[in-house]
Amino acid sequence: MEKILITGGTGNNGKAILENLANTNMPVRAMLRDISKAPIRAKNISYVKGDYEDEHSLLEALNGIESAFLVTAFESSFTKKHAAFIRVAEQAGVKHIVQLSGLGADASSPIDIARWLGEAEDYLFQSTLNWTILQPASFNSNFFASADEVANLSTISAPFGSEPGATVVTVDHQDIADVATKILMEPNLHKGKKYILTGPEKLTYSDIAQILSEELDREIKYMPISDETARLGLLNSGIPESDIDALAQLWPVTREWGHTFELSNHTEKLLGRGATSIRAFFRSEIHQFKKKEV
């Protein structure tokens, strides 16, 4: 019987965890809304259909599970989905949940995303379950959204002011997956722990553009844009306005306080190696940022 349940298996974090677990003998179950999109095929991984709005499907997915990795998109339904999953996990007799939260989680925060994260953490704290919280910085993989712009225009745009501008702290999704995998394999060693996961450096967008320039061997320029321009770009890409409102709250905070964010050594301590740098990320994914051949 499967002992570990992974949610978010088609996302960068969940997929990377499944890839890690496929190299073990641990019986694993992954919950997907659409099983036809199963990302990894391995003898020790099975798939079950589940939806956070369907508690019966959650109960089927969680039946017999000992430890679960819980991740959902950072959107307005975040708290509701986590609350439903945690509630059903208690009913199913799950012992331990590894919850993917984020930096700045605070149920009393005026910043929507930070409040959603904090509220979801509180639901887990108030449950009867054992827990481990992962609070990652911004994902390196978020830069995939700029890949076409980098490839076709040789620019990377963001509403974070001009040089020196605000610094940003990111973390690689493979580092998150490696930490989560380690905890899921040995959950009793991490009961009641909260880990802050960051990369090894603070960088401005000008720094990031310079790194991309060096890796692509052509000049990439950082283009500061206004909040209004950033909002319009997200709207045109099909992101719901309510989610854009939440993201937009982070931009002035980053411009004002970005330089105060502290780096964490939790990744290094947990994995026995340094956290992945943004340069290493771009180097491994550089094909994503090159102009596509017609």
Image (cartoon, rainbow, N blue to C red):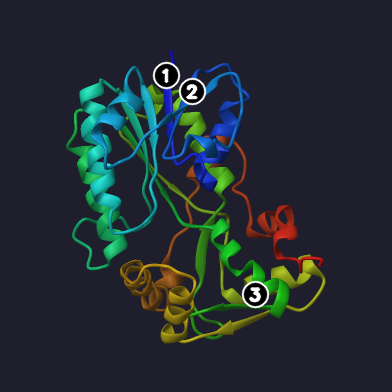
- SS state under label 1: loop
Q: Position of residue 42 (x, y in %)?
A: 61, 24
Q: Badge 1: few (under 14), some or many (20 or more) residues near its Cα, within 10 Å?
A: some
Q: Position of residue 126 (x, y in %)?
A: 17, 37
Instruction: Write the residue at 27% across / 36% down.
Output: 85
Q: Badge 3: few (under 14), some or many (20 or more) residues near its Cα, within 10 Å?
A: some
Residue 240 shown left or right of residue 145 in the figure: left
Residue kind at label 2, given as amino acid type? Val
Q: Nearer the viewer, residue 81 or 256?
A: 81
Residue carrying label 3: 149
Residue 176 shown left or right of residue 214 in the figure: left
Quadrant location of residue 162? Answer: bottom right
**Residue 89 in view:** yes
Residue carrying label 2: 28
Q: Tell me which numbered mark, 2 or 1, is placed earlier along the sequence.
A: 1
- SS state under label 3: helix
Instruction: Write the residue at 22% across / 27% down.
Output: 90
Instruction: Write the residue at 54% across / 39% down.
Output: 37
- Discs 2, 1 touching: Cβ within 8 Å: yes
Residue kind at label 3, given as amino acid type? Glu
Which residue of the protein is positioned furthest toward the top in this rendering?
Answer: 1
**Residue 269 in view:** no
**Which numbered disc covers residue 3?**
1
